[in-house]
Amino acid sequence: MDLKSLIRHARGADAADLVLRNARVVNVLSGEIVPTDIAVAGEYIVGLGSYAASEEVDLGGAYVAPGLIDAHVHIESALVPPAEFARAVVPHGTTTVITDPHEIANVLGLEGIRFMFESAKYGPLSMYIMVSSCVPATSMATSGAVLHGYDLFPLKSDPWVLGLGEVMNFPGVINGDDGVLEKIGAFRDRVIDGHCPSLSGRALQAYVAAGVRSDHESTTAAEALEKLRLGMMIMIREGTVARDLAQLLPAVTPANHHRFCFCTDDRQPSDLIDHGGIDHCVRMAIASGLDPFSAIRMATWNPAKHFRLHDRGAIAPGYRADLVVFDDLQAPRPRLVFRDGKLVARDGQMAVPSRPASRTLRSTINVAWDSTSFAIPAEGRRARVIGADANRLVTQALVDTPARRNGEACADPSRDLLKMAVIERHMASGGVGRGFVRGIGLKRGAMASSVAHDHHNLVVVGADDVSMMTAARRAAALHGGMVVAEGERVIAEVPLPLGGLMSAEPVSVVRTQLATAVQAARDLGSPLHDPFMTMSFLALEVIPSLKLTDKGLVDVDRFEFVPLWVD
Amino acid sequence: MDLKSLIRHARGADAADLVLRNARVVNVLSGEIVPTDIAVAGEYIVGLGSYAASEEVDLGGAYVAPGLIDAHVHIESALVPPAEFARAVVPHGTTTVITDPHEIANVLGLEGIRFMFESAKYGPLSMYIMVSSCVPATSMATSGAVLHGYDLFPLKSDPWVLGLGEVMNFPGVINGDDGVLEKIGAFRDRVIDGHCPSLSGRALQAYVAAGVRSDHESTTAAEALEKLRLGMMIMIREGTVARDLAQLLPAVTPANHHRFCFCTDDRQPSDLIDHGGIDHCVRMAIASGLDPFSAIRMATWNPAKHFRLHDRGAIAPGYRADLVVFDDLQAPRPRLVFRDGKLVARDGQMAVPSRPASRTLRSTINVAWDSTSFAIPAEGRRARVIGADANRLVTQALVDTPARRNGEACADPSRDLLKMAVIERHMASGGVGRGFVRGIGLKRGAMASSVAHDHHNLVVVGADDVSMMTAARRAAALHGGMVVAEGERVIAEVPLPLGGLMSAEPVSVVRTQLATAVQAARDLGSPLHDPFMTMSFLALEVIPSLKLTDKGLVDVDRFEFVPLWVD
């Protein structure tokens, strides 16, 4: 809307397009509930108070907050492209997401990022992009693409690009790696998001001094407070596996709450649809004792300020009419959601049609099956074992003695000691990382997935090699996906042909497919909420402590490969 | 400092340049006092904690806050150019000022702005510029220059330009004036500062909707709160004449203090030197009951965020080492001031030499004296009279019956009814506005000044025409200045040859000259704190209610000329 029209609407010379009558506005600026009407023209709020309009909605005293903002999310983790992701989160009040498309970028590079861009531009959700800084995350895994500084620089001029995405290579920053510093230097005038689990002391100060001003990896209140004091915006994450809110909330005080916001990072469809995303964080925080104003600010104004989105995050003239209507201030459940002045969701359902992506993606699964084997020669006594945690991305570095058979080290499901493999799937190089894992809990059978952060090779966990091969081969045959198998039988599957990360089906279908697959894994013995997502992070070599990539076992604390056998 | 060196310093691999030991850091991020050391390398803070350094200063437990930020100041009102202005404010802890050079711009246009720029770039004070949006403020006065949108646009690419300066022409915005909307439109992606005394209701909403997101003209708590709720950053002003802090402070709450900052707007040298600037605001606010954290945030973090200065406003790694050291948290008086890591002031004195401006300015006084007269024919009975207020810029619109003599209306000092004139001094057009004023209080003699906001014509107030002409002619002969005269005798003067606004002398000299001139005015009967500054705002036709320009009397509430005579 042009400035002159906007002003005419605001001063009441032209009727508004929409007036929401009898609202109780959550004014995040003044920290007050203000009973008033809200006038909207085009995509903007034009006034608060008595206005004439061509359309009126009586809210009957309902609360209205600014549209919620997810400060950091990998849309790919919802297993659907942006248009379908919007169907999952917009009914829950999220109108803006800040996303780092580094999953698809690790598979398809700029082509993958462009695919996400396209959906960003015309959908019912504002999707901003933080350019993926770590593709690949490290050189300790094989990715499908490499993005150098000179690949990223042109993206700075895209209006949807806000800055540089989570700089996971914090050792590179601290040690002055030229490649990562080149990227940081180029984005020094923009927002630079961080990722530094457990980083502390001088190393943390060096990371922050470089200009990295946020973190979403704190898992304790003390860790969050150290980072906050040093200048980081603390993003409290409540994902599917990584659930940090309960641990971090005690760090929030009236004096420091301006330095917190919420994010979901990686959250699968049923969690998003059934429990919500940022609205879930707000409700949890209030239920845990945080005042509703602080909680709502952390979901609106604070991330808007951090990301320099000066047109949103508050309900005031000239701001975008991104609005969430709800009835209970103590447990906000969005009943109506407006984005850019248009009703986009009502009573938990989208009120506008989905806009399918017009762009397609090439098939991305390239595996050298002839040289792929899961056999682990029994070359030692005690082996390193990845200890998976149900609610954290950080693993434990365990040591245990695997069973042996015919000169090979084997899984031992009775002791929850499973075999794990990561099969390189971009270049058909034949690379396979092999190891052991505890915490997935399968008693028999296997799971495979082409979602394996961040390189997204094929990750397989199983009780026996036959089940593992069945699952892995089926995942490949689907051009990517998640598979549960037992012996030579495929039990359940979620096809993810878009980059091996995302489905071509509606999110409601994906949710059902995933629920079926998770149930199948549970039937095989896994007690986890989402064993696939837990498994997908066992391959992520930038989160402590012990991880497995296609190149081998990584001691993340020391940032180096370690042998499987201890002795 | 390059990124790699910064990181090396931060992680302790290279020794810091300076460590401030035993500091109590006012952490505006966390709202805590943190006892620690502060390490500085080059112009940046690199770490908090134990660091080695080539230079150490033991602070003995003193408090350290971020350098103070003046959110809105017209440097010209201190009657000195930026280098000397720095000498007045830096010892008081101000390390960054946001200035709108619209005084000099009204006299010399872009040449005047460039003069201010030059001083901004290498001095001991960070001086950012908001481009003057209203040159002239209105068409109801004659200015020395006109700046259109196309004059301003190139300035957007100057790194010291943050946005568009106070949009005083709020009626123009509200009524959709093309010229002002062109400027606002061009700066829509930057900060746009406002100026809207007493604006309220839909008119205010229209002004805010246009993107104007700050105001420093509120004079009551209710006015400030209405503006704050609608999205404006409220700048609490404590100038020489305009003193709003006591009135506005009750509006500040823990929940809304993030939407307030401090500014001085127009403050003369002795106020700045003797009482301070932003530090004075902080002390006043704390003395009035505001907690020190909120007060210091309002002077540091809040304005930094508003102006999108992401490199300052907090004490954390990677931030500029702009630091203020003081001993009493309840009444902060800067003892040491660091800017960009260098000690720039100690114990109220500059620790670095002043850097004089290398650029000069042409003489700017051009008056058609032959057609200049102060005679007011007695063409009516009751005349409009400007009622000056000692502590506000808003005047009262009074009506009174002037004395008469020989067919002329005369001053009547016994009833505090003085004559006032505004002589056009840019174009030698011969234009003279004439009227009456109450509140200046001279019993005899006259005052003249080439400082007369914002057009800066020659303003004269006096008890008789001879004294007025003596003062006015002397001000012109000085190429601009402030003069007190009685009869044909000049009693005191402050030469202001730079644009008729600023002195070429050191600020300490100007302060003494001004004190002498103010005392001379007092000796003639004026009870005002600074009658020159009060007088200078009597000509400002964008602040209610009745003002006088070289073109005549202006009813500001109706934004139109009105005749001198009521009946």
Image (cartoon, coloured by chain):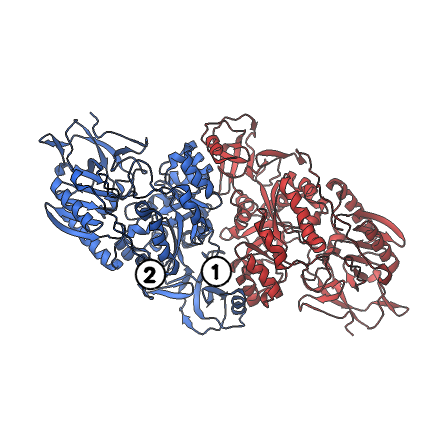
Chain colours: A red, B blue
Secondary structure state at the residue bearing disc 2 = helix
Identify which residue, A565 or A44, lies in the foreground.
A44
Identify which residue, B416 or A362, lies in the foreground.
A362
Secondary structure state at the residue bearing disc 1 = loop
Q: Give the position of the C terminus of chain B as an image quadrant.
A: top left
Residue at 45%, 64% in the rendered image: B43
Asked whether the viewer can see residue B226, the reply is: no
Numbered mark located on residue B477 in the image: none
Residue lying at the far left in this picture: please name it: B406
**Residue identifier under label 1:** B319
Q: Chain of mark 1?
A: B
Residue B424, by quadrant, is top left
Asked whether the viewer can see residue B6, the reply is: yes
Residue at 66%, 58% in the rendered image: A147
Identify which residue, A441 or B69, lies in the foreground.
B69
Is B527 left, or right, of A36 in this rendering?
left
Q: Residues within 10 Å of mark 2 (few under 14, many from 20)?
A: many
Vertical placement of residue A312 versus A463, above or below: above
Which kind of residue does numbered mark 1 sit on?
Tyr
Is A186 left, or right, of A520 in this rendering?
left
The percent coordinates of residue A290 (x first, y second) are 56, 48
Which kind of residue does numbered mark 2 sit on?
Pro
Vertical placement of residue A515 versus B327, above or below: above
Label 2 in the same subunit as label 1: yes
The percent coordinates of residue B351 (x first, y second) are 33, 66
Which is more N-terminal, label 1 or label 2?
2
Is A172 left, or right, of B253 in this rendering?
right
Vertical placement of residue B382 versus B97, above or below: above
Q: Chain of mark 2?
A: B
The percent coordinates of residue A536 (x first, y second) are 74, 55
**Residue identifier under label 2:** B91
The percent coordinates of residue A141 (x first, y second) are 72, 62
